[in-house]
Amino acid sequence: MSAHSRRTRQESRTRGQFITGPQCQHCGTERIVMPLSAMRGIARKHPALSELLGTLEEFREWYTNDQLMSLCPGCFCITGDLSTVHSD
């Protein structure tokens, strides 16, 4: 299997794991919604997100691994509140 085929398959799996949510009240960026376990998996695979992994691990105290979380790719705020009124 070529590196391109493998990368394409991995990208399609990753894209299918999340949906977009309401815009972030902090910066206006469209939020990403996915299970906590998927966010933790992505943070483990990407060294640039290593600081985010610690925060996601702390979320395990309050949320289950399959519970949906919302992450803003603009300002990196994270919440389990999926409503449009989240502003903390």
Image: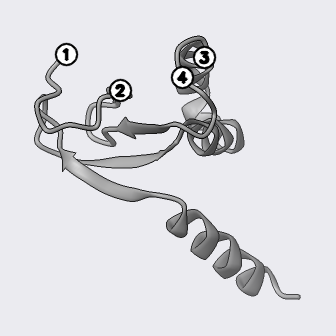
Give the CA separation, mark 1 to mark 2.
Answer: 9 Å
Query: Which residue corresponds to mark 1?
Result: 88
Q: Quadrant of the N terminus?
A: bottom right
Q: Residues within 10 Å of mark 4 (few under 14, many from 20)?
A: some
What amino acid is labelled 3 in the image? Gly
Give the CA separation, mark 3 to mark 1.
Answer: 19 Å
In this picture, residue 22 sits left or right of residue 63: left
Q: Residues within 10 Å of mark 1 (few under 14, many from 20)?
A: few
Query: Which residue corresponds to mark 3?
Result: 54
Cβ atoms under marks 1 and 2 closer than 8 Å: yes
Q: Nearer the viewer, mark 1 or mark 4?
A: 4
In the image, residue 57 lies at what x, y percent?
63, 19
Q: Secondary structure at mark 2?
A: strand
What amino acid is labelled 4 in the image? Tyr
Instruction: Give the numbered dot on residue 63.
Output: 4
Q: Nearer the viewer, mark 3 or mark 2?
A: 2
Q: Earlier in the sequence, mark 2 or mark 4?
A: 4
What amino acid is labelled 2 in the image? Thr
Q: Nearer the viewer, residue 70 or 48?
A: 70
Q: Earlier in the sequence, mark 1 or mark 4?
A: 4
Query: Which residue corresponds to mark 2?
Result: 79
Give the CA separation, mark 4 to mark 3.
Answer: 14 Å
The residue sitting at 38% across, 59% down in the picture is 19
Q: Residues within 10 Å of mark 3 (few under 14, many from 20)?
A: few
Q: Nearer the viewer, mark 2 or mark 4?
A: 4
